[in-house]
Image (spheres, rainbow, N blue to C red):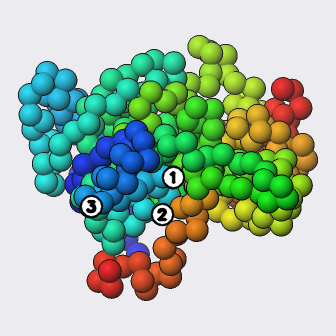
Amino acid sequence: MLPFSFEKGRTEQDAIRTAAAGARYIAGGTTLIDLMRDEVERPERLVDINALPMADIRVDGSNLVIGALARVSDIAAHPETKRLQPLVAESLIEGASPQLRNMASMGGNLLQRVRCPYSCVSEFR
Amino acid sequence: MTMSDHEITPSRKARFTVGNGSARGGLSRRSVLQMAGGAASLAAASGATAQPAPTDGPPPASTTRVRLVVNGSARELEIDPRQSVLDVLRERLDLTGTKKGCNQGACGACTVLINGRRVTSCLTLAVMHHGAEITTIEGLARGDELHPLQAAFIEHDGFQCGFCTPGQIMSGVACIAEGHATSADEIQFWMSGNICRCAAYPGIVAAVADAAGRT
C-alpha cells in the first residue's frame, strides 16, 4: 500500500473542500482498503467521512430515506426497512458477511467498484 | 529407500524448530519481529523520527497519533495510517490472538469487536477508530475464568487447528448479543463470515447454541 495522509472530515463542507483538493472519501473502507493494498487505487490523501451526520434511516410519507453513511447491517435490521422495503432488508443480508455489513455504508455499497478480477489489477488501472 | 532422506539430522531439526527458538540460541522470527516493533514504537514515543525497522522495505510514512481502548486499556500510539486495526493489534500491541487469515475481509479470522460490533479488523484502518473500544479474544476471559462461549468451544469440540477460533469466538459473542443464535440454521447463517478449513462447523454451531442458551 502506498503512503497517504489521513484526515478526519469534521463537516460536510470540510470534507468536500478536502476532496476538491484531491483527497478520496473513505467510509467503511471495505472496498477501498482492499484495492489500495493491491495498489489499484492510489490515493495520496484520504478524508474519513464517518463522523458526518448522514447515517439516518427515516420515513418520509411512504418512502424510506436512507442516509449514505448508514451501515448496511443497521439498514437491514431497521423495523422501517422491514415494513416499507422488506426485499431491501432481505437482499442486504444475503451479501458479504455480518462483519462486513457492520462496516459497509450504503453509499459505499452503491459506489463499489466492479469486482471482476481482470479489472482489479494494477496493470489495468 | 534409505532412511537418510527422512532422518532428522541436527541441522534439519534446527531449521524446523519454532517457538522460543532455543535450538538457534535464543533468536526466533517472532522475537526478532517483536524487537523491531519495540524499537520503532520507542523511537516514535520519544518524539524522534521513526527509524526504519531492521527489515527490508521503505521507511514509514508520516505517522498519526491515535488513541485506542483495547480490552479496557487506553493506548496512545503513533502509527502509519496504512496500518489496519489487525496490524496494530498484532504488531504494535503484541496481541497475537487475532489472526491474519486472508487480509481481505473474506475469512473472518481477524474478527474483533469495535464499540461492541463485530468487524473484520484487516479491512479497517486503525486511524479511523480514534477513541474506539476494541475487544479482542484476549479480552474475553476474566482472569482464569473463561467466557461462557470459550468454555462451550472446548466442551463441544469447536476447533481442530485453532487458527480460525479466535475470530469464530469473537463473531459468536456478537452473534449471540445480536439475537441471531436462536437456532442452528440461524447460527449457520449469521456465522457465515467465519470460515474453518478444519470443518469444525458442527462443534462451532453447537458451542454458540449452548452459550446462547446460557446468556
| Mark 2 vs mark 3: in front | 3
In the picture of the structure, the residue carrying the numbered disc 1 is: A28
Mark-to-mark CA distance, 2 and 3: 19 Å
Q: Is residue A46 shown left or right of residue A83?
A: left
Q: Is residue B214 left or right of residue B43?
A: right
Q: Position of residue B11 (x, y in %)?
A: 23, 52
Q: Chain of mark 3?
A: A
**Residue B90 placement: quadrant:** top left
Q: Amino acid at mark 3?
A: Gly
| Residue at 30%, 46% in the rendered image | A6
Q: Disc 2 is attached to a residue of which chain?
A: A
Q: Name the residue beneath numbered marker 3.
A: A22
Between the C-alphas of marks 2 and 1, the distance is: 8 Å
Judge whether B84 appears above or below B89 on screen: below
Label 2 residue SS: loop
Residue displayed at 58% across by 36% down: B113
Q: Give coordinates of residue B110: x percent, y percent.
A: 52, 46
| Real-space CA distance between mark 3 and mark 1, rounded to the nearest whole angstrom | 19 Å
Residue occupying the point 84% across, 34% down = B212
Q: Around disc 2, counting alpha carbons within 10 Å, would you say few (fewer than 14), some (14 to 19), or many (20 or more)?
A: many
Left or right: where A20 falls relative to B157: left
The type of residue carrying mark 1 is Gly
